[in-house]
Image: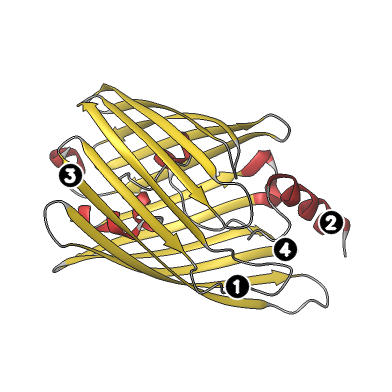
Amino acid sequence: MSGRVVTTMAILMLFSTAKASIPDKPTGGQGAAMGQAWVALNDSWAGFRNQAALAVNRNFWAGIHHENRFLTSELGLSTLGVLIPVSPGTFGVDISHFGYSQLNTTRIGLSYGMKFSEKFMAGIGLAYHRMQMAGEYKDRNAFTVEGGILYAPVEKLTLGAYIFNPTRSSFDDSQSLPPIIGAGATFRPSQKVVLTLQVDDDTESSPNVRGGLEFTATKNFCFRLGYSSGNPEGLTGGFGWMVKDINFDLSFGYHRILGYTPQLSVSYCPGSKKNS
């Protein structure tokens, strides 16, 4: 095995359990800046994490996202996402690529979410995962299913829950895709402030607690802060900026040992400024 592969695998094991999956799921700048506490958010990127959030998005939307984890090019994650509203719901398509030429994974996902009432939404997603390693190693494939719900008992509060890979699909015994379950809440005490909290568990390590804050300084600009106790662990922050129908979301994560992780999302949604 080449030195670059060994180095990459060593870095992966520093922030993940030995059997944890290589990260390849889309995240988006908002959730990344708020400690990855996305389960009860209803932004467009959140729909690729909790498919119920797709139901809130009723306009065509397309976005790209890139993460440079720990400022290491071998740990780059790039994602393309598209939302297509139909009746009565919204489809989401996402394509992600993580890693580099010697070791990488690709994910292709199809998801759907819809409203069952003004207060309750649900969604489901299917994904194909492919792992490639250089040399004599064979490519590995896996299929996963996931889904989630959102419930808004009152105007300012949204509750969310999700599950990933309950069928325990995996690449093999050494590279699994562990089941993940989680729940959380988003509270909006005012039009300018969003608070979010989430707890999730991958069934193979200790539960993670995540939380975040978003403050809207002007109509088109907001600040975000967050913290995550688990993968990826550390402090987070960033901002969002809307220019006509284009959203820019920049975030930074900080791990006390491995350093900084910058992330950038750019998305386009016709009519988003008019409807904001």
- The crowding category of the residue bearing disc 2, from other C-alpha atoms within 10 Å (few below 14, some 14 to 19, many at least 20), is few
**Is residue 59 visible in this depiction of the protein?**
no
Pointer 2 or 4: first along the chain = 2
Q: What kind of element bears circle 4?
A: strand
Q: Type of residue at label 2? A: Val
Secondary structure of residue under mark 3: strand
Sequence-wise first label, 1 or 2: 2
Query: How far is mark 1 from mark 2, CA to CA?
Result: 20 Å
Tell me if 240 is positioned left or right of 130 in this view: left
Q: Which residue is mark 3?
A: 153
The residue under label 2 is 6
- Asked if residue 12 can be seen in this view, the reply is yes
Specify the quadrant that holds the C terminus: top left
Residue 209 in percent (x, y) is at 50, 39
User: On the image, numbered disc 1 is attached to which residue?
Assistant: 130
The percent position of residue 183, horizontal first and vertical second, equals: 39, 49
Amino acid, disc 3: Pro
Q: Are marks 3 and 1 in contact (CB under 8 Å)?
A: no
Q: Tell me the distance, in whole angstroms, between the alpha carbons under discs 3 and 4.
A: 45 Å
